[in-house]
Image (spheres, helix red, strand yellow):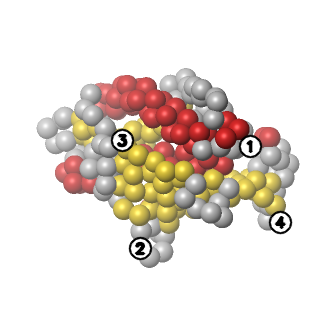
Amino acid sequence: MAELRPLRCEFGVLERADGSARVVQGATSVLAGVYGPAEVKAGKERSNRASLEIVVKPARGQGGVRERFLEQLLAGCCEQCILASLHPHTALSVVLQIHTDQGSLLSTLCLALCLALVDSGLPLSSPFSSLSTACSPDGDLLTDPSLAQEQASQSLVTVMTDCSSGRVISTHTQGVCSLQQLESSLAHAEKAGEKMKQFYQKAVQRRLAKDAKFSHLNIAI
């Protein structure tokens, strides 16, 4: 399996958010902010769980069809991982700002979303990770592709997985992808899951180390 591009994160970058994280994966950069649980607007209240809103903002201009589609994908992932039943009659809002898109955008958005939720302290059933693979015209699989590699490929598969169990939460495919290529992409995502688990563990340990009352804890995800 090919190496992932350099990956780094920063917590608490938005003062007014209840949780926030900036994730840079290669040259792709995304900022996520979590707001809530807060008072819910009339008509959107849910008696058994918090209502969830995901907003994706492009680097320039107004959001369009692509951003609305990304919002739906990320909301579906979130719904499976947030323990929203612990906060009925409230609203959760997540805003994701795309700074640069140089490949594997959906994966980077997913990582930023998860880390912002971790920073907010909201209860999760498990952290989740994501990996994109592109299939070249020659049939080679490219892990965590750059934008140029995506544009030259015949398909792009993004897999979102539960870090604890390895369960596949969601998959998204662009272009023409054979069953064999999809299975290979799932296998790549499973292998990358262990690396992402280690990344999350180190990131959360750094985050909690900033809080004196948690500095003695050894966090395992």
Q: Is residue 79 visible?
A: no
Task: Say which residue label 1 marks.
Answer: 84
Asked whether, in this view, residue 114 is left or right of residue 147, the answer is right
Name the N-terminal-most of marks 1 and 3. Answer: 1
Q: Secondary structure at mark 1?
A: helix
> Of helix, strand and loop, which one carries label 3?
strand
CA distance for labels 1 and 3: 27 Å
Q: Residue at x 41, y 64 (%)?
A: 99
Residue occupying image coordinates x 40% and y 57%: 29
Q: Position of residue 40 (x, y in %)?
A: 80, 61
Q: Determine which of the numbered discs, if any, sits on residue 132 in the image.
A: 3
Q: Which mark is residue 42?
A: 4
3D distance between C-alphas at marks 2 and 3: 24 Å
Q: Quick check: 80 left or right of 10?
A: right
Residue 111 in sight: yes
Q: Where's residue 209, x and y in %?
A: 59, 39
| SS category of the residue bearing label 4 | loop
Is disc 4 in contact with disc 2, using a CB cutoff of under 8 Å?
no
Label disc, if present, on residue 119 of the rendered structure? none
Circle 1 or circle 4, nearest the eye: 1
Question: For the residues marked 4 and 2, what is the alpha-carbon distance in whole angstroms?
Answer: 31 Å
Q: Earlier in the sequence, mark 4 or mark 2?
A: 4
Distance from disc 4 to disc 3, alpha carbons, whole Å, reads 38 Å
- Gap in angstroms between the C-alphas marked 1 and 4: 18 Å
Return the residue at label 2: 60
How crowded pointer 1 is (Cα within 10 Å; few <14, some 14-19, many 20+) is rated as many
Q: Which sits earlier in the primary sequence, circle 2 or circle 3?
A: 2
**Where 172 falls versus 125 (above or below)?**
below
Q: Position of residue 186 (x, y in %)?
A: 38, 29
| Three-letter amino acid code at the position of disc 2 | Arg
Crowd tier of the residue under label 2, counting other residues whose Cα lies within 10 Å: few below 14, some 14–19, many 20 or above:
few
- Mark 3 closeness class: few <14, some 14–19, many ≥20 residues within 10 Å: many
